[in-house]
Amino acid sequence: MTKQEVVIKIAKINRIIGEWKYRVDVGKEIESLSPELSYLAKWTQEIIQYIKKNPSNSLVWQIRNIGFTDLVEDYIKKHRNNTGAAYIYSLENYVKSLKELMSICDKYKEEHKSQYADLTEPLANKQVATLLQRAVNAGMLDSHFQPLPQTQTIQLRVIAFAVSSICGFQHTYAYFERLWNRENSYRISTCNPPRYKTDDFTKTKRLYPEVDFSELCPKHDIEIFYTPQEDEDKEKLFNNLIEHGYISPDTRLDSFMGIFDKEKFTVPVEWKKGQRQLAYFVHLAFSKYNEKTLWIKAECCFRIKGKIPHKQCLITGYSWIKRAGWLDIFDTRLAKICQEFNHVENLSEEDFIPPKRPIHTSKVVFHSSRRESDRKKMFAALLQGEYIDPNTTLSDFNSLFDDKEFKKPVKWIKSQSQLMYFVHIAFKTDNPYDLWKKCAACFCLSNGKQPNLTSLNSNFRILVKNGLLETYNTELKTIADKYVGTHKSGRKSISPITASKDDTNPT
């Protein structure tokens, strides 16, 4: 018997047993099985005779893939009395012969066990083991070269790509899919590199500095905005965005002009405001001539804190503004800049500043629709009531309403709950979008710490639930109502229900 004939018989055994297992699983009669079932024991014995004289790693590996006999033995035990004797006899002989064959293979594997026994062919060599040891040392693989629970699929892809590149494997991922048993889970060959959370991806690439990973990372063509405006209009847009703090003050004019010219493009522009404001700006300024690829171009041309803005977040952010009916009032200053850039004709001052207040002029400071005299009176009342640090100047307080003047938060010396109560009554109307974020940015507590966003939000819901919105602190409510313009001088005095200085729960 030749090695080829042995391989054919192993394949036949796998096919017949696989068909038998399928029929058992779906409840079909075993008598309808192929008559070749009776040859299983005979073929197994012939394989035994060959493997004793001509053992090899490849044959041992193929034999071990046949699998265990547990399912067959269990079937024999349960159906001995209701299944044909000839089939039971054939199965029993097969089980006996296969156990003998497996025993021979186990003995051969033990005798030829080496330091690469944990690796499958053709990975079982010194070069591959040395390369994989880097991942073991980095805590991505265990001592048997198997993935640890916290190891991500993209990290396995990087390791497989690097080892295959260095060793020159024709099939980059096939050997590793088998080594790490990925056939029935997420395939490493189809795992795409991340675009945003790249820390683990980058960390794994550093293990193999000699490898060029450019093939692993998809390349995206530079996408720039088309606009018919002249260079003078673009320069004016640039100056307006710089002046009002929408883009980084370090941005150079030639870099900004690159987002309109692919040949001049060098680096993306750093956007200093929120991602939703970026979506608002991009749509107002460029959607007329870039509708189909607007958000792809936004991803290419802008960065927020050095990171690529998320395309889907840009889309949903703009959609949110549109559904709320705030397209004209979300950020009136930014809207005015875009209108000037697009040469919107016959605009009066009323067109730039709608009757309603703007929704989101800054993500740091409060917007105020009240006069400066109203803010001054509120400042004096808060000082007199010992709600804010007595060292606070009027200039410091006014900076809470001007992002260009804002330098540091004002110290609130009462409890966080009272700060929450005051901010909601005084500023909610003009700042409906991100009130608590602005509160945390504009104020600090007596210990110097920033107010807790979660506590502000949850404690306010408790206050409303308990019906304390009108009576929690009547002095603060009076100060806030006078600022907003809703205070009634004839209001009957109500005893205030205030929390202690250290209390953060309005209940």
Image (cartoon, rainbow, N blue to C red):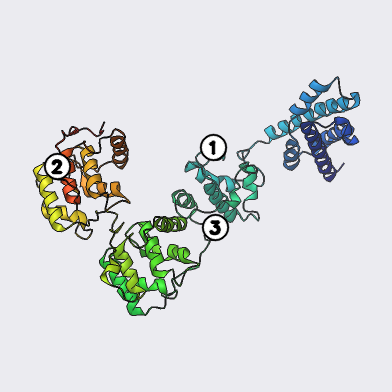
- Residue at the spot of label 2: 387
Image quadrant in which the C terminus is located: top left
Q: Is residue 61 left or right of residue 86?
A: left
Structural crowding at the residue carrying mark 1, measured as other residues with C-alpha within 10 Å and reported as few (<14), some (14–19) or many (≥20) = some
Please name whichever residue, 43 or 28, is drawn nearer the observer in this view of the structure: 28
Q: Is residue 233 left or right of residue 135?
A: left
Q: Is residue 6 left or right of residue 293?
A: right
Marks 1 and 3, the one that precedes in the sequence: 1
Please, what secondary structure does the residue beneath circle 2 have? Answer: loop
Identify the mark at residue 143; answer none if there is no mark.
Answer: 1
Q: Is residue 5 above or below residue 30?
A: below
Please, what secondary structure does the residue beneath circle 3 have? Answer: loop
What is the three-letter code of the residue carrying label 3? Leu
Percent coordinates x, y for residue 379 in the rendering:
13, 50
Marks 2 and 1, the one that precedes in the sequence: 1
- Residue at the spot of label 3: 216
Please name whichever residue, 312 or 429, is drawn nearer the observer in this view of the structure: 429
- Residue drawn at x 68%, y 36% is 112
